[in-house]
């Protein structure tokens, strides 16, 4: 919710209402430890831990796809092998990290 509250964008109020109605996944007790490992291993930057949190949640809950527009820290082919390696060391699932454009085919 914190990120969705940032900035102004079309249909913001509708989106916030929709998200309030969703079932939210529980954060694992060890989430802070996982986030810290991501920072220590240079998987995610320390200045904004939101990306690390999203990756932990998708990995911990074995979500097949982490959908993001963030190509710097998440949907980055150059980082994927490091994410995979660190997740394997932590015993976490490795989700596919994709942008909406990668996930959906465009109609011709």
Image: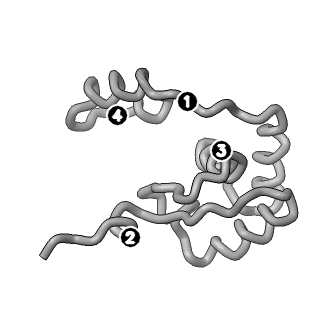
- Which residue position holds label 2? 102
Is residue 20 visible in the rendered structure shown here? yes
The secondary structure type at the circle numbered 3 is: helix
Image quarter of residue 27: top right
Task: Say whether marks 4 and 3 touch (CB < 8 Å).
Answer: no
User: At which x and y percent is residue 30?
Assistant: 84, 38
Is residue 48 visible in the rendered structure shown here? no
| First in residue order: circle 1 vs circle 3 | 1
User: At which x and y percent is residue 84?
Assistant: 72, 69
- Which residue position holds label 3? 57
| First in residue order: circle 3 vs circle 2 | 3
Does 34 sit above or below residue 107? above
**Whole-number angstrom distance, CA of label 1 to CA of label 3:** 11 Å
- Which residue position holds label 1? 24
Left or right of 99 in this view: 11:
left
Q: Nearer the viewer, residue 7 or 26?
A: 26
User: At which x and y percent is residue 4?
Assistant: 41, 33
Task: Say whether marks 2 and 1 touch (CB < 8 Å).
Answer: no
């Amino acid at each position: 919710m914190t990120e969705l509250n940032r900035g102004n964008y079309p249909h913001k109020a509708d989106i916030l209402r929709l998200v309030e109605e969703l079932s939210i996944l529980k954060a694992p007790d060890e989430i802070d430890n996982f986030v810290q490992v991501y920072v220590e291993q240079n998987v995610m930057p320390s200045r904004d831990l939101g990306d690390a949190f999203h990756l932990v949640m998708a990995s911990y809950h074995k979500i097949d796809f982490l959908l993001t527009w963030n190509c710097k820290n998440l949907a980055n082919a150059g980082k994927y092998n490091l994410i995979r390696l660190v997740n394997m060391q932590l015993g976490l699932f490795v989700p596919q990290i994709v942008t909406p454009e990668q996930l959906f085919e465009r109609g011709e």
